[in-house]
Amino acid sequence: MRVLITGGGPTGLTLAIDLARRGLDVRVVDKADDFFDGSRADTIQPRTLEVFDDLGVVDAVLDAGCPPPAYRVHLDGRAVEERRMAEPRAPRPDQPYPNPWTLGQSQLEGILRSRLAALGTRVERATELVGLEQDEHGVTARFRTGETARFDYLVGADGGASTVRKAIGVAFSGTTDETVRLVIGDVRAPDLDPAIGHWFAAAADPMTGVAMTPLPGTGMFQLNTAIGTDDHATLTTMQRALDGFSAGVRLTGCHWSTVWRPNIRLAERFRVGRVFLAGDAAHVHPPTGGQGMNTGIQDAYNLGWKLAGQTLLDSYETERRAVAATVLKVSDDLLRRYAAGHAEAHRRGEEHLGLHLSYRAQTARGTLAPGDRAPDAQVQDPTGKRIRLFDLFRGPHATHLVLGAPAPDTDHAYAVLRPGDDPAGCARYVIDTDGGAFSAYGPLGASADGHVLVRPDGHLAQPHAPR
């Protein structure tokens, strides 16, 4: 099966990795002449770190990035306190990556491209899709180079101005507010401590100011501030904004910058025939809360296994469009709190981490139900080695757990036993030495004779309950 992905950003790269590790013939094209080189989306949420664990890149991401920084608050040019958007949380058995991680988008894309290259696929630059036609058997793609190629499926991960979305006639409902403009730029500021973030504001209006977040591995900060309707994304504009709150802090260079307006939109369809939309091609978010890139990555993670198996394809739109709508509301609400000068607008809660987003049915009840994220837990393998359930889930397969009884003698099926249980008759098993697995999965397993099925994307499927 051949799949074309248009767009070589985090969404397209994640999908390409997932398809390539399954042995599919995947082609990734991007119209840009060069790879993006800037920070843009610099927050990786905990659920996305779990996705990266499965895809084999989490160690590289953690090595290259850093935890979210504390921010030194400067009012009227004087440092008055240090604050965090959220207090760091300790890892738990069911949540091995409890906190967001900071890493510039271009650095993340480099890590993902390296992983994709190791699987035998590279992003084709300067290769622009200009048109497509589809029929019941496949999709014909036309490129600006004059090439025409045939694919079984096509995925548009080509951004908010998506050529693919326009080609399949999908409306992009939402609003754009031309009265609010922010400049975001990667700048050098040698006068500032690079180990911490900085917030500059006036004491009379502490919620309006300039945020500067250190970018690990670059020696730069990402600067973010509101600007006027006639201002441009230049170093001069950013220096002038900073001078309004702090005398003497010099910006000595700008590596990348852009002007952002509140553009909040959701595609009416995520699938038309053999063509799918993912990431910003399907939904665009405010930067508040760090949700846009993470939602796109999880679009790709949801779609990959369904495309590979050519199964449950309609559920991609059903599941991911509902999640995108929820996340858009969270981001928009946070943006409105900023605009209103709400004192807690800088705080981040559980709703931003991605760990509680679910595909469960509206009628589902209980702490765990089909569609929820499958929790992790510490267990012990037959040799006595401490491992995690995530170690069992890792890879392009579903996982079948049976609590307290032998599992079927099939690949990726495991009995989960309590200490002292007799493993006789168990082809594969783990020991729940700490009780975490039974605690997390017991309520779900009890409804299906102890059988739990974990989808390839780490969400719970309807449980197996052979009788």
Image (tube, rainbow, N blue to C red):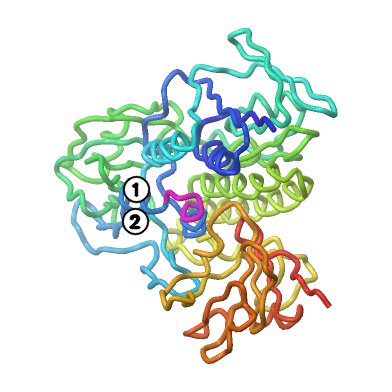
The reply to whether the magenta stretch includes residue 356 is no
Q: Looking at the image, is 210 positioned above or below residue 32?
A: below
Secondary structure state at the residue bearing disc 2: strand
* Magenta segment main secondary structure: helix
Question: Where is residue 51 drawn, in percent x and y?
Answer: 52, 54
Residue contact between numbered discs 1 and 2, judged by CB atoms under 8 Å: yes
Side (left or right) of 459 relative to 74: right
Q: Looking at the image, is 44 positioned above or below residue 347?
A: above
Give the camera-side residue of 426 and 414. Answer: 426
Question: Where is residue 329 drawn, in percent x and y?
Answer: 62, 54
Question: Residue at left 66%, top 79%?
Answer: 406
Side (left or right) of 450 relative to 126: right
Check disc 2 and give the amino acid type: Pro
Residue that mark 2 sits on: 206
Give the camera-side residue of 37 and 346. Answer: 37
Quarter of the picture holding the N terminus: top right
Residues at marks 1 and 2, CA–CA distance in whole angstroms: 7 Å
Disc 2 crowd, CA 10 A, few/some/many (<14, 14-19, 20+): some
- What residue occupies the far top of the structure in this picture? 146
Give the quadrant of residue 424: bottom right
Please say whether residue 40 is visible from this viewpoint. Answer: no
Which residues are drawn in magenta?
52-57
Check disc 1 and give the amino acid type: Gly
Disc 1 crowd, CA 10 A, few/some/many (<14, 14-19, 20+): some
Question: Where is residue 423 drawn, in percent x and y?
Answer: 58, 83
Residue that mark 1 sits on: 209
Question: Where is residue 402 drawn, in percent x and y?
Answer: 66, 76
Give the camera-side residue of 440 and 184. Answer: 440
Question: Residue at left 44%, top 76%?
Answer: 383
